[in-house]
Amino acid sequence: MDITPSYYLVLAAMLFTIGAVGLLVRRNTLVMFMCVELMLNAANLTFVTFAKTLDDIGGQVIVFFTLVVAAAEVAVGLAIIVAIFRRRQGVTADDIHALEG
Amino acid sequence: MEAVLFFSFAALALAGALGVVLARNPVHAVLNLLVTLVTMAVFFLMQDADLVAIIQIVVYAGAVVVLFVFVITLLGVDREESLHEPLPLQRPLAIGLGVLLLLQVIVLAGNEWATGEHSVRGPLDDARSGNVETLARSLFTDFIWAFEITAVLLVIAVVGGVVLARRSRQVPATRAAEDGS
């Protein structure tokens, strides 16, 4: 059987959904970050799939920029988590309720 | 052959993704994430994105995952946590929204298929050098401004990370009072 681009797109949609549900369900901020990484990777997979489908190098170049943004996000996000852990002694989302009304 | 490869690695990727969401221990979640990231690199290879696949392994499976493991061990949060959910409706609602999202994306992908112009930024040209050359040329000509801006973004991220994670020796009295700690 032939693997068409739609197989990759459906797989990317499923990975994106798992990441989104994980982001909503989990309370550990580290695991929530990992779910964001999953969603970014699903988006990357669609970019590469469309680059192949449309025979366009632009899709693969965009993946580079997504990778850079993901790396910057992880660096800043983990620094924020470390800063919060120092103050609150916990990394679950329930520990970060300083803004509640 | 391609179908066997695709379906076995797709099962692995989905298992890794589910493992991230369901693992009680954050370290197990990171290792499951690693499985998914490496299978992603395989999918990139299967679609003629050689350089992107290698960078995926180096940046994601190398740097990002190691950073996660480092922070988990640094903070000592590597123990099992209960998956108990205090809000009663949160979990079914989240799963329902997730299913809705999945159906939406699949329906949209089925109806509104991307039918753009082909090779706007140049063809893939994978015959000669595994399109590394084409990618580099596009990156350093068409996308040069975006490339420079990502350099600025990385510098900002590094400075921000250092500022956030730095522990000042003495906290001024007024700031300590403001924090209410």
Image (cartoon, grey):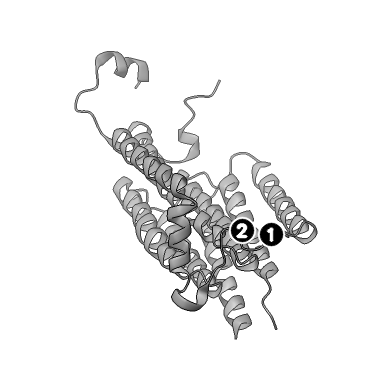
Disc 2 packing (10 Å; few <14; some 14–19; many ≥20): few
CB contact under 8 Å: marks 1 and 2: yes
Q: Report helix, strand or loop for mark 1.
A: loop
| B53 relative to A68, above or below | below
Q: Could you tell me residue B169's position as x and y percent?
A: 19, 28
| A37, above or below B178, in the image | below
Q: Position of residue B23 (x, y in %)?
A: 50, 58
Q: Residue at x 66, y 46 (%)?
A: B94
Task: Point out residue B93 in the picture as x, y percentages from the top left corner.
Answer: 70, 45
Pick the residue in front: A22 or A51: A51
Q: Is residue A35 left or right of residue B31?
A: right
Farthest residue to the top: give it.
Answer: B174
Instruction: Return the residue found at the far bottom.
Output: B1
Q: Which residue is mark 2?
A: B120
Secondary structure of the residue carrying tag 2 is loop
Q: Are marks 1 and 2 on the same chain?
A: yes
| Residue B130 visible in image | yes
Name the foreground residue: B94 vs B167.
B167
Identify the subunit bearing mark 2: B
Q: Quadrant of the N terminus of chain A?
A: bottom right
Q: CA distance from mark 1 to mark 2?
A: 6 Å
The chain letter for the residue carrying disc 1 is B
Q: Residue A56 falls in which quadrant of the image?
A: bottom right
Task: Say whether residue B38 is visible.
Answer: no
Disc number for residue B117: 1
Task: Name the residue: 62% across, 39% down.
Answer: B87
Mark 2 residue type = Val
The quadrant of the picture occupied by the C terminus of chain A is top right
> Left or right: where does residue A20 sit relative to residue B36?
right
B38 vs B27: above or below: below
A48 lies left or right of A29: right
Q: What residue type is disc 1 on?
A: Glu
